[in-house]
Image (cartoon, rainbow, N blue to C red):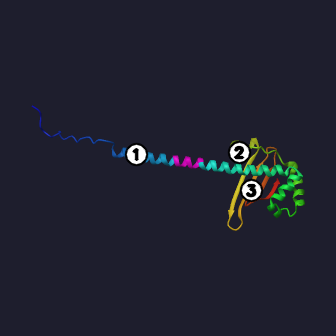
């Protein structure tokens, strides 16, 4: 005959599903994973934005430097950038200054070198971009490119207008 007793002998039945600590641990793990994924994704987006800004600055720097390699190009550069008149009141002043530093103007690659090359002092060519925004005077950008042969090309811009170019 079968036992019709409902008594399980005092043993607590084992609950079904995951324990509370497993659920808490899993939740914390998911939060940590999402945090790292957000940091990595945000870092990647910032890296890409920085690369685009460097590419834009590189194009401007190379174009200006190539124009300054000749007297006619330097004249066209001065006429295309009225901001240069702040430092050089006349085109003759600019031409005289550019003739002085033109022989030290090194080669600038067409494409911006990768970050590893730009940061390695043994490979020359370092790029430095400084930007500051001011309420009363607008945005100022300073670009300096160090040649592998020594010396640096420096461009200063205010509100996208070139205000100075020189080789130091």
Can you give x and y, in whole percent of width and height, for residue 59 in the image?
75, 49
N-terminal of the pair, mark 3 or mark 1, is: 1
| Residue sitting at the far bottom | 136
How many labels sit on residues? Answer: 3
| Residue sitting at the far left | 1
* Real-space CA distance between mark 1 and mark 2, rounded to the nearest whole angstrom: 42 Å
Question: Residue 119 bears which disc, if any?
Answer: 2
Q: Which residues are magenta?
A: 37-44
Secondary structure under the numbered disc 3 in the rendered image: strand
Residue 42 part of the magenta segment: yes
Q: Which residue is mark 1?
A: 25
| Neighbours of disc 2 within 10 Å: few (<14), some (14-19), many (20+) | some
Question: Is 15 on the left-hand or right-hand side of 125?
Answer: left
Residue 137 part of the magenta segment: no
Corner quadrant of residue 23: top left
Question: Is 136 on the left-hand or right-hand side of 20?
Answer: right
Residue appearing at x 80%, y 52% in the figure:
64
Residue appearing at x 75%, y 53% in the figure:
143
Question: Residue 142 bears which disc, if any?
Answer: 3
Residue appearing at x 71%, y 53% in the figure:
129
Q: In the figure, 115 relative to 86: above or below?
A: above
Q: Foreground mark, 3 or 2? A: 3
């Amino acid at each position: 005959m079968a036992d019709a007793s409902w008594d399980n002998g005092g043993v607590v039945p084992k609950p079904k599903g995951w324990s509370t600590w497993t659920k808490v641990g899993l939740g914390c793990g998911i939060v940590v994973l999402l945090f790292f994924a957000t940091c990595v994704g945000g870092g990647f987006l910032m890296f890409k934005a920085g690369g685009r800004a460097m590419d834009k600055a590189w194009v401007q720097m190379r174009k200006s430097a190539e124009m300054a390699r000749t007297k006619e190009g330097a004249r066209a550069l001065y006429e295309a950038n009225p901001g240069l008149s702040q430092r050089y009141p006349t085109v003759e002043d600019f031409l005289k200054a550019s003739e002085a530093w033109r022989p030290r103007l090194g080669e600038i690659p067409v494409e911006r070198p990768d970050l590893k090359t730009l940061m390695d002092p043994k490979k020359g060519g370092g790029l430095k971009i400084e930007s500051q925004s001011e309420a009363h005077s607008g945005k100022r950008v300073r670009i300096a490119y160090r040649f592998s042969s020594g010396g640096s090309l420096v461009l200063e811009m205010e509100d996208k207008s070139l205000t100075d170019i020189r080789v130091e």
